[in-house]
Image: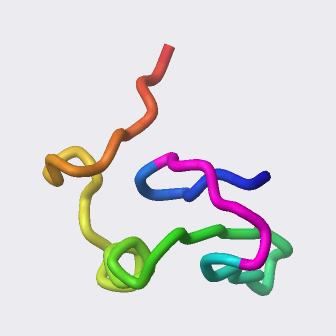
Amino acid sequence: MAKCNICLKEIEEGIGITYVLNDGKILHFCSSKCRKTHQNKRKLKRLKWTKPEKKK
């Protein structure tokens, strides 16, 4: 099972959207809300519904 790159939810097989970029990076999105957030280049820190990864 993959995780959404924006909200970090588990995505079941057959659900969601998978993008493959030209450099070979794979992006998984659980919904159109997450996809549009990435397309519009929004900062994840500013969105309350996302769970940005904490840097160690």
Left or right: residue 45 compared with residue 32:
left
Q: Position of residue 16 (x, y in %)?
A: 61, 77
- Magenta stretch: dominant secondary structure: loop
**Residue at (25%, 58%) from the top-left corner?**
43
Q: Which of 32 and 54 is in front in this view?
A: 32
Q: Where is residue 38 in the image (x, y as percent from the top left)?
A: 41, 74
Magenta stretch: residue 52 in it?
Answer: no
**Residue at (35%, 84%) from the top-left corner?**
36
Q: Nearer the viewer, residue 3 or 53?
A: 3
Residue at the extreme top of the image, as rendered:
56
- Among the 4 quarters of the image, the one containing residue 45: top left
Q: Give the range drawn in magenta.
A: 8-14
Q: Which of 6 and 16 is in front in this view?
A: 16
Q: Which of 41 and 14 is in front in this view?
A: 14
Left or right: residue 49 compared with residue 15:
left
Query: Image height check: is 34 above or below 56?
Result: below
Q: Position of residue 55 (x, y in %)?
A: 46, 23
Magenta stretch: residue 12 in it?
Answer: yes
**Residue at (45%, 33%) from the top-left corner?**
53
- Among the 4 quarters of the image, the one containing residue 54: top left
Left or right: residue 51 compared with residue 3:
left
- Among the 4 quarters of the image, the one containing residue 23: bottom right
